[in-house]
Image (cartoon, grey):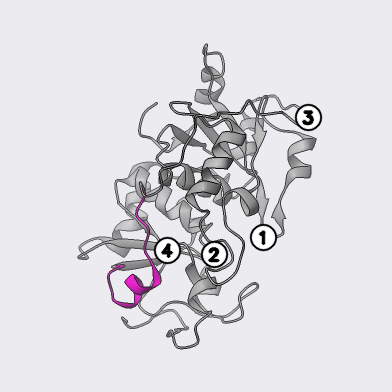
Amino acid sequence: MTDRALISPDELAASLTDPTPPLLVDVRWSLAGSDRPGYLAGHLPGAVFCDLDTELAAPPGEGGRHPLPTQDSLTATMRRRGIGPGREVVVYDAGPGAAAARAWWCLRWAGHEQVRVLDGGLAAWQRSGGALEVGEVAPQPAPQARAHVGSMPVVEVDDVLAGRGGTLLDARSAERFRGEVEPVDPVAGHIPGAQSCPTTALQEADGRYLAPSALREVLAPLVGGRQGPVTAYCGSGVTAAQLVLAGHEAGVDVGLYPGSWSHWVRDAARPVATGPAAGRL
């Protein structure tokens, strides 16, 4: 498998005829929770289901709404879902792509490099004429799987406060960034100095990601010419993974602040900014 983060429906369909086809992992999810009923009603042939809330995140708490899973729990997930060493994996969701990006990021963070995201997700697969099947698929366990976390850059809150996070990109909607609305967290606004980069700017209207050159055009005004690292955050560390994925495709290294806004606002002493512009920390 190449180092590309994305795979098209046509490429995926062709790969499913290989002697050892990729393992398909359905990670449908929304703010309401993981969508197992949707998976059971119709999924890509052979796809196994992965629950983002319980398998790709630790329980909510001091670390925010979706803290990163521990190395041991991620190892258990990989073994349970059949993600063994060298196994090619394709993850997908039903839009807008955040859950699939989180799964891609977690597996890459765990040291599993052979993973890609189905570009456009379930809808793109169906538009291309891809078939669905119903019901549960029992994974073939991979007892030899082992997560070795640390293969993707993680930025902690102390790094952000000290400026070591570099350029901060906020993946939430512009309205949430400006503090005009906040549907989930108790405080509205954004981290001072952050740049607004909603994930909707990364995708076509049909949910496919922009071409790498177009992604560079989106990111360049935000990070071009700036010194130091780039860090993505969102509400709870899920949607921000799409910025990391887009950066990967565009050739821009982007770290992830996993706790994101839901963690930032747990401490009232941390500064909060509202409006379209903000000063640096």
193 in relation to 78, above or below: below
- Pinpoint residue 81: horizontal percent, then vertical percent: 61, 34
**Residue assigned mark 3:** 134
For the stretch drawn in magenta, the main secondary structure is loop
196 in relation to 162, above or below: above
Q: Please tell me whether residue 74 belongs to the stretch shown in magenta.
A: no
Select label 3 or label 4 by which is in front: 4
Span colored in magenta: 152-165
89 in relation to 231, above or below: above
Left or right: where 7 falls relative to 26: left
**Residue assigned mark 4:** 257
Residue type at numbered disc 4: Tyr
Mark identifier at residue 236 = 2
Asked whether 55 or 187 is in front, the reply is 55
Give the alpha-carbon distance from disc 4 to disc 2, as whole Å: 9 Å
Mark identifier at residue 31 = 1
Comes first in the chain, label 2 or label 1: 1
Residue type at numbered disc 3: Val
Residue type at numbered disc 1: Leu
| Residue at point 72%, 47% (across, down) | 35
